[in-house]
Amino acid sequence: MSDRLLEGLDSSWPKADASALFSAWHERLQEIEPYSAEIAAATVAWGQAIAAAADPAALVGAQSAVIGRERGAITRALAEVPQLPLEQRKTHGRALNAAKRLLSDLADARRAQLEAAATSSDAYDVTLPGRRPWIGRPHVLAQVRDELLDLFHGLGYSVYESREVEKEEYNFGKLNFAPDHPARDAHDTYFVAPDVVLRTHTSPGWVRAMEERKPPLRLVFPGRVYRAEQVDASHMDQFHQIDGLYVAKNVSMADLKTTLNTFARSIYGPKTRTRLIPIYFPFVEPGCQMDVACAICDGTGRARDDASQRCPVCKGSGWSELLGAGMVHPNVFRAVGYDPEEWTGFAFGMGLERIAMARYGIPEIRLFLENDLRFLHQF
Amino acid sequence: MKLPLSWLREWIDTDAPAEKIAEALTTRGFYVEGIETRGASYPGVVVARVLEVKKHPNADKLSLCRVDSGQGELTIVCGAPNVRAGMIVPLATQGARLPGGLVIRHSRIRGEESQGMICSARELALSDEHEGILDLERWANEGGASDGSRPAGVSASNPAGAATAQVTAAALVIGRPFDELCDPPDQVLEVEVPFNRPDGLGVLGLAREVRAALGASWSATARTRLSARWQGRADFDLELEDREGCPRYLAQRIDGVVVAPSPPWLRRRLESAGQRSINGIVDLTNLVLLEFGQPVHAFDAAKLAGNKIRVRRAQAGETLTTLDGKTRTLDPEVLVIADRDRPVALAGVMGGQDSEVTETTTSLLLECAWFDPRRVRRSARAVGLATEASKRYERGVDPEIGSPAAARFLALLKEICPNLKPMAARERNHLDGRRRTLLLRPARSARILGLDLGAAESKRLLDSLEFGVEAGDPLRVTVPSWRPDITIEDDLIEEIARAHGYEKIPETRLETSGVYAVRSESERRVARARRAMLARGLDEAWTPTLVAEREAADAARLMGESAERLVRLVNPTSRESEVLRPSPVAGLLRACAHNLRQGAGSVRLFEVGTGFLKSAGELPEEQRILAALVAGARYAHAHDAAQGLLDFEDAKGLWEAWLEEMRVDTPEWRAYSADGWKPGASAEVASRTSRIGWAGTLHPALTRAWDIEVPVHLFVVFLDALARGAADVRASLPGRFPPVRRDLAFFVPASVTHLEIERALSEAAGDALASIEVFDVYAGSGTPEGMKSLAYALKFQHPERTLTEAEVQRIQDRMVAAVAKERGGRLREK
């Protein structure tokens, strides 16, 4: 019996005192001894091996040799208990089960001890930075544009994209800029051929869209536009606009005002104050400009730190220009074959750079296309 | 346009403050950009006499002065070297507030009491002079302010235009408030005048708007000026040969003229409106222009040959030296004023130098005309000039204001030159003279504005702007002569809205009208392309469309395009931006070089943008292109062997992952060599046999030319071409039966590519091959001469049953045989 209980125990394995590892060892061993001194002795022998297992592999080896599900010495002895004489069945069964539980608990204790030791020796300096992949950031103008397009999407506007190099007729003529009209002077124009220009605004898109589609329609026109200007801190010859256009049976200026206010409150907050003032664009009549209360001075027109000085951003007016808008001019409708008596519509247009500069306090318009990483990474 | 409020108040009776007037103009479409205060007031500053000057006992550079302030003697400590007994000076007494905000208090300076301050010109904001205190007697003798910016009469500007008295020694009464020697401060509005409102380029036009907005009335002066009419003889030899270009012209000869500096009030008035004073005559022409918006010109009549005026087109090759000293060669597009022999002015644009008014001029020819806006614009364009006159004529001068304007000029001239004699004159007028009439349907107004104001209110609003309105439906509206911008019914609707106030337009509920927002396929594709690049850790760049020739040429080369297809600007503003980019690569390289120069160690950028190339059609081809470049470190951070410089395979992995995220159907990479790319490290990328782009490492010679010293890996794809190669998504059931894994390593000839082996293996294996992945590539010791080793991890799986060992072995044997037969490879023994 005792030989079989020790089968698989290698005498060359190191030995250690199990009680030093497992405080309840003696107490639990006494649950076995009254039933079988033999089993208690084998338990002590296996316990020495388990307590001394040098690493997780040795521990698994010793553990499975004694209480492994198929080949463990005690497991097999338990399997043979039914064949024992009746008077031994009860005592041996109890002793073997107690031994199995004890050795299993001991192995758990040894495993925990080994893991604790391993962790402390392979410890990372958690303050060191990790192996970090790169982060990609959307361009600040893309962020602003996408936010605005989302907003207009919610108001029912689909995106319409059109050419950047345009026929002069689409950039001016069909938008009611009369030939030889001084209004063209406001658009310093780049030419690539005598009648071919870089669009000076995104409004040629309206003409393209209306020529292509039947009303009603509700569209936004994001894109890059060009003006032949000398570049400085506040002027770029390439910048970005979003135009909007809504044409239906009875669109009115009141609808325009509602739309623009909804828009302004969405990007600047529900308490934003706005005002609508007249302005001239050839392609709308009546024309208007929407201003929002200056975000820097909160519409007071006074400098924050010195109320006797004018606010440097709005120059004392208390307002900053947000966008231009108006009711589509009947001549524009005629140019695309819409009947101005049947259809009415409004349009609006805004500059992305202006909105981004106001929102983030960006001091120079040139920064947008320079792509300095130290700038791009701020947004 | 600068609008001095003192000038505005000559025209309308209002005491509204500047802010209210500015608000009225702004909300009616004349944006007031700023309010400037000219001049200052000097509470507590008086004229004083220095009685005695002693040295300050405790300071070398200070003096102790006894000063008569008119209210008793004061002791003043003064630091100016020019102070002397007997001098008459401006004295800031206790409580005085100076223009800079300084408030004067009694103080002790180095132990001596000072009961005020003797002021320099700079301390009074009169000039920048700070060399010493202001000697009022000298100042008076010089006629006031030394730099002309702050003239000083004893009274305010004289509304009647009479010359004001200068500050004289007699005015320097001791104890007199200094304010009495100076003009009261004036406020000047900076008004942005819309292109369609030429009337706003005159004080009169702005006064009309302010009057309507505030409900003010015209002043008596205004009524007098507006009802004045020019009267003159009809004996001057004047012919309008181009009646279309010049339908109305008034010529008036005046003798007995003396050309002298303008009186202070005139100088001051022009300066406050932003004009430099030249001489009395020129200043008066400018005054009339600024007041009525009607340009008038004064010729030296003695310099006009034949004593006659012809208004005609220039003959080709005729020349004229204009007032700016430039000699201009003219063509028949240009309308000129000519005398008997030659052009003497560019009509409506600029006068000629030869007939300029000078100090020796004694006789004038006054011109007050109406030129056709388009003709003036063409003339101005033809000679490349834009002047205050041409700006007004181009936009449309009031055709009815000429007579009051000429009358006003002559009245003012009479004040400057009391001995003038009106001589020969003539006015020719071929203008129709009838005002435009339009019909206005109140119903359309309500429909456009979303606000029904009714016929009566519409009439009232139009009346306030001096439109003539006949009641009825529609209303019959006569447009004032100064409003060339009002040509259609909708223009009247805007007038009604302006007069009513845009702020009173109500808000409504937003209607859908049956149109809903959709996102197009191409919009979603671009969004996905950007997201997929951001996910690879590339920053999004927005680079310029307009780039330098060299930059565009490099970008074109990398796409295999010649520089001939580049689209160039006809009128570039700089060499840095004269060509339209053929792809965003030009800007990305510029940004890459910039960032490396600024010390960045790594640059990872992409852009989705338009590329432009010439096409056979009228308009260039515009392609939507995604370009990306990476250079520098593999990781944002790593402090072990994993870190290193990105190489071709790192970059290719990024592009492959991107292509997979874009669902490109089995993209194919083919070795590619072209100018600009590094040999052996570039590829073209195709999908379903059509090329969608290129990828690879840039040639070191190219990057060096951009001052880039690290390897740059580039990727360029046509997003529309890529859309055509996108895979259709069809779902399939994942295999449920256990997979079998095998590794196979082959020696293959060095020239054979991975793709060839992979294809041979896949075809030989058939459907049972669930995946294949190369896991090792090796050439060197241990490999036979001319061979390399490629090792593949294979996974076999059958959709409907478990594969047996024998089956897998048979498939594997077929694969080995195929590699041997098709590509000359053999299985590498263990």
Image: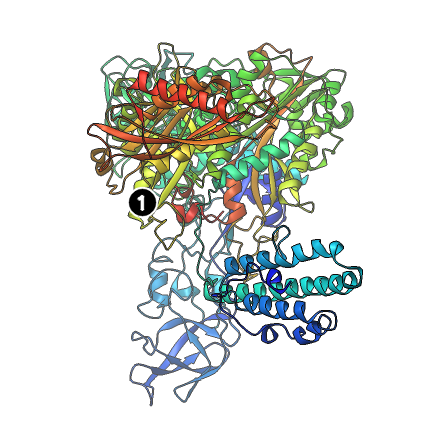
Name the spot of residue B493 as percent of width and height, x first. Answer: 67, 24
Chain that bears disc 1:
B
- Please determine whether, in this image, residue A41 is positioned above or below residue B622: below
Name the spot of residue A360 as percent of width and height, x first. Answer: 51, 48
Question: Which residue corresponds to mark 1?
Answer: B645
Q: Nearer the viewer, residue A329 or B18?
A: A329
- Please determine whether, in this image, residue A209 is positioned above or below residue B271: above
Query: Which residue of the protein is positioned furthest toward the front in this rendering?
Result: A85
Q: In which quarter of the image is residue A186?
A: top left
Q: Which of B248 and A160 is in front in this view?
A: A160
Q: Residue at x 44, y 61 (%)?
A: A128
Q: Which of B442 and A102 is in front in this view?
A: A102
Name the spot of residue B604 as percent of width and height, x first. Answer: 38, 41
- Please determine whether, in this image, residue B96 is positioned above or below residue A374: below
Q: What residue type is labelled 1?
A: Leu
SS for dot 1 = loop
Q: Which of B555 and A226 is in front in this view?
A: B555
Which color scheme does this rendered protein use? rainbow
Q: Residue at x 35, y 62 (%)?
A: B139
Name the spot of residue A89 as percent of width and height, x first. Answer: 77, 60
